[in-house]
Image (cartoon, rainbow, N blue to C red):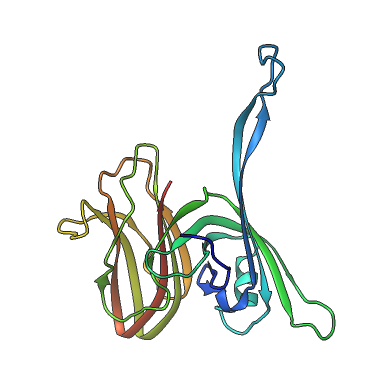
Amino acid sequence: MGKFILTDVRLFTAGADLTGRSNKVEITSEVEDKDATNYGSQGWKEVLGGLASSDIAGEGQWEAGDPGKVDNVSWAELGAVGPWTIGPDGAAVGDLTYFTRALRADYKLGDAVGEIAPWTGSAKGSWPLVRGVFEHAPGTARTSSGDSAGVELGSVAAGQSLYAALHVLSVSGTSSPTITVEVESDVDGNFSSPATQLSFTAATAAGGQILRTGGSPVADTWYRASWTISGSTPSFMFALALGIR
């Protein structure tokens, strides 16, 4: 991925796609530097890495009126912890993404007369910031159970975890339409003997979830989404991000 102009940044939080309602997104990740200088440091400071943290800040045009609009989701999330997913250049399968579990810390709206009504807000990470890829594109509607093609991420080493962020963006249908999404792994892209690594809670409405494995190694190198859909005339739009850290 070479140099590019920011024109297609994708922003997802909970069950909302804020891409068309945002014009600035910033991600910050840092590690505290703790002074360990002593008389044996030969006149140079010594530092050790302390606690890590991440922050997400965004702004854009204010809208309200349904759960997918920025005002609705901001009020619902304020003070709550949930998934945030940012794609620097699109959200197609395989596109780069950064995601985390974060606390919605603040929300600001309003400006002077004559201005387009703006919003600003930020979230404070409570899990590691993960660098991964989109494994399911938000613009693909699913009306029946199925599997994605899969992506090759590599194995999960001991002490690492597989992370997954799910954003269910829209739900339609009758007789309680429900979707249950799982993340499966296998040794190659054929998925002849897939193993379930993560299972999200069944969703009947728009919303977000984020999961991670417990730190045990996974030898498989390929991963995919598998979903089970039930109900009458169901249709779901969702985005899924995967990464290893």
Which residue is the extreme one toward the top?
40
Viewer-proximal residue, 41 or 66? 41
Work out whether 47 lies above or below 145.
above
Image location of residue 235, percent across then percent down: 36, 82
Image location of residue 119, percent across then percent down: 70, 73
Work out whether 161 lies above or below 35.
below
Viewer-proximal residue, 108 or 41? 41
**Image side of residue 72 versus residue 227, left or right:** right
User: How many numbered badges does the structure rendering display?
Assistant: 0
Work out whether 158 lies above or below 228.
above
Q: Please report the residue visible at 42 percent of the width from the left and 69 percent of the height from the top.
A: 239
**Image side of residue 3 versus residue 93, left or right:** right
Q: Please report the residue visible at 45 percent of the width from the left and 69 percent of the height from the top.
A: 91
Q: Please report the residue visible at 29 percent of the width from the left and 75 percent of the height from the top.
A: 229
Q: Please report the residue visible at 45 percent of the width from the left and 79 percent of the height from the top.
A: 170
Image location of residue 224, percent across then percent down: 29, 61
Viewer-proximal residue, 168 or 111? 111
Image location of residue 200, percent across then percent down: 37, 61
Which residue is the extreme one toward the front?
3
Which residue is the extreme one toward the right?
113
Work out whether 16 lies above or below 95.
below
